[in-house]
C-alpha cells in the first residue's frame, strides 16, 4: 500500500514538473513571436518609407534609426528569452521561484524607445506630406 502511494505521488510530481516545463516553453515561444513582430516593425517601416518615394532627410534618418533600433530590440528580446528560459528551467528543477522584474523593465524601456522613434517618424512623415499639399 505504501509503495503504491509513493508511486502515485511520484507520478503527480512528474506531471507537475511536466506542466511547469511546458509553460516555460510556451512563454519562450511567446517571447520569440514578440521579437519577430518587433523586428518586423523596422522592416515594415523601411519598406513603406521606400514605397512612398517621397524622401526627406529627417524622415529618412528616422526610418533607418527605427529599423536599427527595432532589430536590436528584437534580437535583445530573443537573447533575453533564451536566458530566461534556461533560468526558469533550472528554477523548476530546483523547485524554487525568482521574479524576472529586471529583464522586464529593460525590455519595456527598449520598446518605449522604439515606440518613441516610431511616433517621431510618423509625425515627421505627416508634416512632410502636409507641406507638399
Image: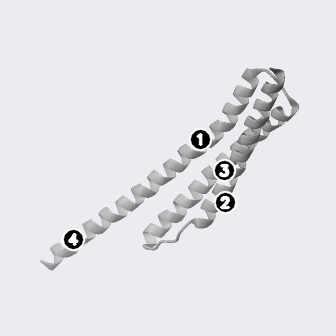
The crowding category of the residue bearing disc 3, from other C-alpha atoms within 10 Å (few below 14, some 14 to 19, many at least 20), is: some
Nearer-the-camera pick, 3 or 22? 22
First in sequence, mark 4 or 2: give its number: 4
Disc 3 is placed on an element classified as helix
Question: Which of the 4 quarters of the picture holds residue 6?
Answer: bottom left
Nearest to the eye among marks 1 and 3: give it: 3
Q: Earlier in the sequence, mark 2 or mark 1?
A: 1
- Tag shown at residue 7: 4
N-term-proximal mark, 4 vs 3 = 4
60 with respect to 30 (left or right): right
Cβ atoms at labels 4 and 2 below 8 Å apart:
no
Q: Residue at x 79, y 26 (%)?
A: 130
Residue 36 badge: 1
Whole-number angstrom distance, CA of label 1 to CA of label 4: 43 Å
Q: Mark 3 points at which residue?
A: 111
Task: Give yes or no for contact between labels 3 and 2 (Cβ–Cβ under 8 Å).
Answer: no
For the residues carrying marks 1 and 4, which lies nearer the camera in this image? Answer: 1
Look at the numbered disc 4 and give the secondary structure of its residue.
helix
- Under circle 2, the secondary element is helix
Q: Tell me the CA gap for discs 4 and 2.
A: 44 Å
In front of the other: 40 or 115 = 115
Amino acid at each position: 500500500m505504501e509503495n503504491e502511494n509513493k508511486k502515485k505521488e511520484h507520478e503527480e510530481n512528474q506531471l507537475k514538473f511536466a506542466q511547469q516545463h511546458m509553460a516555460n516553453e510556451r512563454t519562450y515561444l511567446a517571447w520569440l513571436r514578440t521579437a519577430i513582430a518587433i523586428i518586423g516593425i523596422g522592416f515594415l517601416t523601411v519598406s513603406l518609407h521606400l514605397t512612398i518615394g517621397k524622401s526627406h532627410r529627417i524622415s529618412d534618418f528616422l526610418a533607418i534609426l527605427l529599423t536599427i533600433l527595432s532589430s536590436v530590440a528584437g534580437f535583445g528580446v530573443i537573447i533575453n528569452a533564451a536566458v530566461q528560459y534556461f533560468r526558469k528551467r533550472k528554477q523548476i528543477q530546483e523547485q524554487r521561484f525568482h521574479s524576472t522584474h529586471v529583464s522586464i523593465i529593460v525590455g519595456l524601456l527598449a520598446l518605449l524607445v522604439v515606440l518613441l522613434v516610431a511616433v517621431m517618424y510618423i509625425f515627421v512623415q505627416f508634416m512632410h506630406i502636409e507641406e507638399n499639399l
